[in-house]
Image: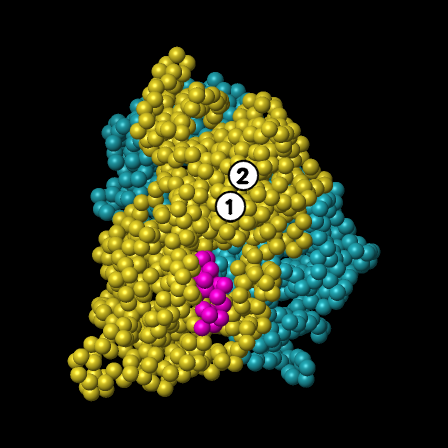
Chain colours: A yellow, B cyan
Amino acid sequence: MTLFKRSKLLWFSLLGFALLATLLQANAYAAHPNLVITTSDVDKMREAVTQPGRFTDEYKKVRARVDEQISQPIVVPVPKDGGGGYTHERHKKNYQIMYDAGLIYQISQERKYADFVRDMLLEYANLYPTLDVHPKRKVKAQNPGKLFWQSLNEAMWLVYTIQAYDLIYPALSTSSAEKIEQDLLTPVAEFLSVGQPSTFNKVHNHGTWATAGVGMTGYVLDKPEWVEIALYDLEKSGKGGFLKQLEMLFSPQGYYNEGPYYQRFAMLPFVTFGKAIENNEPDRDIFGYRDGVLQKAIDTTIQLSYNGLFFPINDAIKSKGTDTIELVHAVTIAYGRTGDTGYLDIAREQDQIILSGDGLKVANALDKGLATAYDFRSVAFGDGHDGKQGALVIMRSDINGEQALLFKPAAQGLGHGHFDKLTWQFYDLGNEIVSDYGAARFLNVEAKYGGRYLPENESYAKQTIAHNTVVVDEASHFNGNVERANQHAPTLAFFETNQYGSVASAHIDTAYDGVDMSRLLALVTLPELQQTIAIDIFDVVSDAEHQYDLPLYYQGQFIDSNFPLDAHTNTLSALGDNNGYQHLWLQAQSQPSEGLAKVTWLNDNGRFYTQTSVVNGDEQFLFTQLGANDPNFNLRNEKAVIRRVAGQKRHQFVSVLEPHGEYNPSKEYTLGAISRISDVSLSEQEALILVTLDFGEVKYLVAVNTATSADSDTEQSFNYQNLSYSLKGRLATYVIENNQE
Amino acid sequence: MTLFKRSKLLWFSLLGFALLATLLQANAYAAHPNLVITTSDVDKMREAVTQPGRFTDEYKKVRARVDEQISQPIVVPVPKDGGGGYTHERHKKNYQIMYDAGLIYQISQERKYADFVRDMLLEYANLYPTLDVHPKRKVKAQNPGKLFWQSLNEAMWLVYTIQAYDLIYPALSTSSAEKIEQDLLTPVAEFLSVGQPSTFNKVHNHGTWATAGVGMTGYVLDKPEWVEIALYDLEKSGKGGFLKQLEMLFSPQGYYNEGPYYQRFAMLPFVTFGKAIENNEPDRDIFGYRDGVLQKAIDTTIQLSYNGLFFPINDAIKSKGTDTIELVHAVTIAYGRTGDTGYLDIAREQDQIILSGDGLKVANALDKGLATAYDFRSVAFGDGHDGKQGALVIMRSDINGEQALLFKPAAQGLGHGHFDKLTWQFYDLGNEIVSDYGAARFLNVEAKYGGRYLPENESYAKQTIAHNTVVVDEASHFNGNVERANQHAPTLAFFETNQYGSVASAHIDTAYDGVDMSRLLALVTLPELQQTIAIDIFDVVSDAEHQYDLPLYYQGQFIDSNFPLDAHTNTLSALGDNNGYQHLWLQAQSQPSEGLAKVTWLNDNGRFYTQTSVVNGDEQFLFTQLGANDPNFNLRNEKAVIRRVAGQKRHQFVSVLEPHGEYNPSKEYTLGAISRISDVSLSEQEALILVTLDFGEVKYLVAVNTATSADSDTEQSFNYQNLSYSLKGRLATYVIENNQE
């Protein structure tokens, strides 16, 4: 930033109007603060904290926290530790303190807060020029930082710190500002941009943090050039940079290619820099970019959750959900922009107010009780930048409890993607029922492989056998090759949701050479029984004979099977040698005879679940527990039942998942512990799939129209057992017998 | 009941005063209702429901439930199913409906409720005389019922039903009452008393239900004889019956010999019949019996809980806690009697109001906000009817979180007792940390061994290796012989709680021939570090060489050990053949070298826990997972680390349990994942045990006075490293170095 900006008042008095106009143009980003929070926001916040309410409560809370922290000595340690270690955590804590103290300075106008931030920045300005790259940097894979072991953390540091600097700028002397800009902010911004072109230009969330940090620094330090490279890449080619990231990393519906865990993580720099662009250069209409993809991305992140937690696809830590700080910021900005009171529902659950202009709007609206229920929908999110590289499908029902079915004919999602084409998950009454391992990682726990992704993340969690989808010949999809996987997404044949439930079908023929896999999943409501069921039809077809394995990872205690188990009681062996199989202990196996094979388990939510499979006598059922070849006890000991057929060219796996009953040992009753389904039959009439389900009291016919040409308006008639039926759209159910009282 | 009781009014007008006096004497239990609820209670309840408040809310809730149920047809099925089956659950539901409808009749005075109960009772009166013993009765072990597979359920049915009958009695015609009494209530009471002398006379909770049912029926049907046999046994010898049960089943402090799970279960007939005796025959001063043991028993049951759940010792289902209906009744009666506002704290957590006179008092007090914190104490409950057959020790701390340590030098506790002398459990932040399996049972789940105790309850859950105590030569305490175990309890050497924490020591030399086992456990608070630790010193001494195993069942994910593990990665075998060992898979072993052996795990509560053991190089550490020889997947797959020494005459196991740090993946930070203890040393000076603990910043000396003669007033001086210290009572800590900032 140049001298003439810093002594504006003096110049204004010396120069005439014409010159002033020129100056304002040259100095486009004049006011401080003007990133996420503007001077006008500050005025409103100062006014707000004179009144009681959520905003004032939060302000007092943050101020008390800041007061406690600024009473401590400033500690800016020489970087030494990796993730989770002392210096790592200290530097993370520091940028948070600076950000908070900057906010409190602006709202309270008490100088001590600004002075604290200034002093810490000056310490950083003393330290930073002395630093080489971090001693604990990873040898390969990612770029190192200086304050942190990876530059990703350095970029996050800058995103917070530049906002803190912007907030306290009005309180700085010229010399302090110069030192901080020259010895700290400029070197950090340069280190993260020209210093690491591969990261900065990368169309990837690490690139987003870097471009957000550098671009916002450009606004504050009055370096339009930095804003330009942040938006268009170092060469201003438009092949990288923030806009390319917005274009390539999100689908048109705002689905982020790596899945919700990383979408959540990526949202913060997107919405932060987006809001800063909006405030500094509204003409860029950043929130209108790509038909409003930023706004859609925020909404999609919320849709990708169940019971407050994100669906744990790909590398995902399961405890992350909509109450993470990234989503609090995103939801706040979304409400600020749209005024959609459904966001207040999420904000209320988050129970955290952001001290910003938008945060004030949220607080006021919550104070007034304006929240309305957020609308969680059944929806298929097209994957890939064009939305055509497969899809992530969510089906929901709340007829009895609150069910969600996730179907994943999605693209690979880059390096954090799992080889799990066409897998599914099921949720009910707040819990995982049919589950996914997520990532094998103990975040920041040094003793667990330095807090990084564990080796078992590669050897197990990413492998196909770790998921609820078909494994051919014990090899993972695409042979576990990421590059090949990134080239080939499944195809979503159709998705529809209507009064009867939701149905989707997808296929892929590139996961294995010469094998075509297609799956149809339906979440069907049966109001007569106050029941939801999931129907799963998985077809594998090949010209050659293969072994096909289809696991179902169930959460809960095994209760019963309607076929005898041959259990390995005195010794256990690993199921296989490679591709994740080496981590599975084979506990028992069975070959149920033709008919319905049932496996029932009891979830912690107190409900029973039965998978009823239609079998022909050629399937083995293998019962496994995770934990073999895990010498450091890194894995959770999850359980699966794997259906296996060997030496077959084609096979159809058909099953129905049925939630039922209640186990209540506290109140000492157990109801409906036994599956009610006594018969399942499947037939086809051209493109129609007909499934009959006999629940004893009620007998249903479920019809699905799989015709390529069909849509939700298509009407079709068909006959079944001498009766004629009419089907509108893709899915319908019919009560063909009802003996209820 | 005789005719002259039923037409009192007529008689009163015909007879003179003298005769009336005689009558009143003969007919001591005249008014209806007069069991738990009296006519005076009814008056107050009728008044109460005209006002808003908790009581009226509950009344409306129950009335709505009853309205819904009496709109259904009455179903009194012929008994057919065992526990959890349809007819079993239906008859349970019926007695609950009758009880509720009786209440609503008394409060609302609407005849339809009484009519409904009458009609159901008449159906039962038609059915009962036709019944033989239940078809699903157990072949051995327990007495059969007629309506239910076991007479225990039949007694429970009578306890509820006789109250329902008492409540609707004023609405009955003479003929209905006669039929119900002659064909139903009398036969049931006779079946449960003279029909099953062994159960009725047994000093056991099954006997309590039977005597309560029969005794209350005596009050209602005006059969003082039945009250007498209920109180003193069939022969009125006083060797059995309710009073003997009160005398023998509880310790003087009100600890129930079988443990809290069964104490909770037993409380309902005790407090119900107790209250009925109090209301009918106040002169018996039943609540004053044995220095108020009934009241103490209620209080003790609450003390035996952590985070709302009972400590799961012996056969216990872990989800049972203070919100069970038995405790709601007990706490209600306790508050009604004492007015102690601490009970309101529990009542508030229970969130359920009983429709009774005492329930009205609770509701009014809660409405007025009178609840005060219930005082959970560190306490040693003497076991056995004389309180001298060992003890159950609870130590509590809330310096950082909320810790509880349970130490169990208790008596065997009859047939549901476990062979776990001197075991311990540890709790923190609401969760189990060092745990006990509890009972192996899926209550009322037919598919799991008919919902009864599983075979694995005997083969594993009761065995010593399933607990955190020493196993000698892979045999269980008392060789698993209940009769022998019932003869020999451990001895509590001392227990004290003071400002430094709590400490207890106990020993037993009868669990194994020729082996003396003694254990000292202390829960010590270290305020300088905002830290609680548990110190465990377990001595085994014998003249012969033995193998000693000491398991620690830890709840959570293994994180790290400071010694290398030799893991069985590709095949697993069971650890042994018998006494529970056959159910343990041996996952890894190690022989740590001399010094401190640390094992760290991460609990779901987000906190790390490290067991730091002082080892001499002669201990093996075995890492096990439960699940071997479990062909029906009946067991939970819990984990243990077992310390083993072989071929030794004596051994001292010393360890410190240290809660530390926080894992917060949602907010992305991990703090203090590594144990802070760098040194533990143990020395003795005559009866003084001195433990030094080096936490780096702070170094502590912990002193315990084990002298037989010492008590909490004993003062003793001692020298340690040339400094002199003074110890008052049993336990103290001293900061011997403090380098904190």
In this view, the residue in front, A654 or A14, is A14
Is A613 above or below relative to A154? above
At 37% from the left edge and 58% from the top edge, which residue is drawn? A243
Q: Position of residue B219 (x, y in %)?
A: 41, 35
Circle 1: element type:
helix
Of helix, strand and loop, which mostly describes the magenta segment? helix
Amino acid type at image mark 1: Gln
* Residue highlighted by disc 2: A510
Q: Position of residue B471 (x, y in %)?
A: 72, 52
Q: Which mark is residue A487?
A: 1
Image mark 1: chain: A
* Residue B166 appears in view: no
User: Image check: B216 left or right of B63?
Assistant: right
Q: Position of residue A52 (x, y in %)?
A: 24, 66
User: Image check: B475 left or right of A421?
Assistant: right
- Magenta highlight range: A190-212
* Residue A476 appears in view: yes
Amino acid type at image mark 2: Thr
State the image quarter where residue B719 is shown. Answer: bottom right
